[in-house]
């Protein structure tokens, strides 16, 4: 029994590992680019592009793209947020969980049917968030909330591949 408790404790510590390395950025949201990207102005008046962790929202030219952006704007524009982040993406944006007065804004976008749970990067989430995001997406699908109102919504990653095929990106 003691060995089992030690294993559980070890697994709990591992699941919190990414939070130990996370930094917190606090600032004012001064721009919303789309349903999963914002710009935060810190107390030194420096701007930071933030990619919301764990979600993938429709692209601007995609069905529900504008609605997803409006939803995120309603939630955070011109409000102070905390961003728990631990990495930059290939575009130089901080990738992080955005919180407003304790509310997980990434999760809220999923609940509103304005984003998918981004399973491609779910290993970067703690287990509790991974489960909650996945369950919230399932609920939004079942209730046909937001983009789930469409019979066959297209995942943003598939949309991007069709709009920007790799062979075009590789051309000079």
Image (cartoon, grey):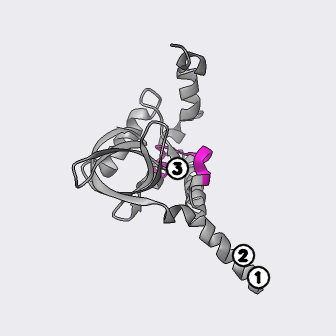
Q: Give the range drawn in magenta.
A: 110-123
Q: Which of 86 and 136 is in front in this view?
A: 86
Q: Do the residues labelled 2 and 3 touch (CB within 8 Å)?
A: no
Local crowd at mark 2 within 10 Å, few (<14), some, or many (≥20)? few
User: Could you tell me which quadrant the N terminus lies in?
Assistant: bottom right
Rendering coords of residue 143 (x, y %):
55, 49
Q: Which of marks 2 and 3 is nearer the N terminus?
A: 2
Q: How far apart are marks 2 and 1 (CA)?
A: 6 Å
Q: Are marks 2 and 1 in contact (CB under 8 Å)?
A: yes
Q: Earlier in the sequence, mark 1 or mark 3?
A: 1
Q: Can residue 153 be seen in this view?
A: no
Local crowd at mark 1 within 10 Å, few (<14), some, or many (≥20)? few
Q: In the displayed structure, would residue 22 be above or below residue 66? A: below
Residue placed furthest toward the bottom? 2
* Residue 93, picture quadrant: top left
> Which residue matches tag 1?
3
Nearer the viewer's eye, disc 1 or disc 3?
A: 1
Q: Which of 62 and 96 is in front in this view?
A: 96
Q: Residue at x 49, y 37 (%)?
A: 90
User: Is 98 on the left or on the right of 131, as rendered?
Assistant: left
Q: Residue at x 48, y 42 (%)?
A: 89
What number is the disc on residue 54?
3
* Residue 161, picture quadrant: top right
Q: Distance between the residues labelled 1 and 3?
A: 33 Å
Q: Which of 139 and 8 is in front in this view?
A: 8
Q: In the displayed structure, would residue 145 be above or below residue 158? A: below
User: Is 31 on the left or on the right of 105, as rendered?
Assistant: left
> Which residue matches tag 2?
7
Secondary element under disc 3, as helix, strand or loop, is loop
* Residue 18, picture quadrant: bottom right
Q: Is residue 136 visible?
A: yes
């Amino acid at each position: 029994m003691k060995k089992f408790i030690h294993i559980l404790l070890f697994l709990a510590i591992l699941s919190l590992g990414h939070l130990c390395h996370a930094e917190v950025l606090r600032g004012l949201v001064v721009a919303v680019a789309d349903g999963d990207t914002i710009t935060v102005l810190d107390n030194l008046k420096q701007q930071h592009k933030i990619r919301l962790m764990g979600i993938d929202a429709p692209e601007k030219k995609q069905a529900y793209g504008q609605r997803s952006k409006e939803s995120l704007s309603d939630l955070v524009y011109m409000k102070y947020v905390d961003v728990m982040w631990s990495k930059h993406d290939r575009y130089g944006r901080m990738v992080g969980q955005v919180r407003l007065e304790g509310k997980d804004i990434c999760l809220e976008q999923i609940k509103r049917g304005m984003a998918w749970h981004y399973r491609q990067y779910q290993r970067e989430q703690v287990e509790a968030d991974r489960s909650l995001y996945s369950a919230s997406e399932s609920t939004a699908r079942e209730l046909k909330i937001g983009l789930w109102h469409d019979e066959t919504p297209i995942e943003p990653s598939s949309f991007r591949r069709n709009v920007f095929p790799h062979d075009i990106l590789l051309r000079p």
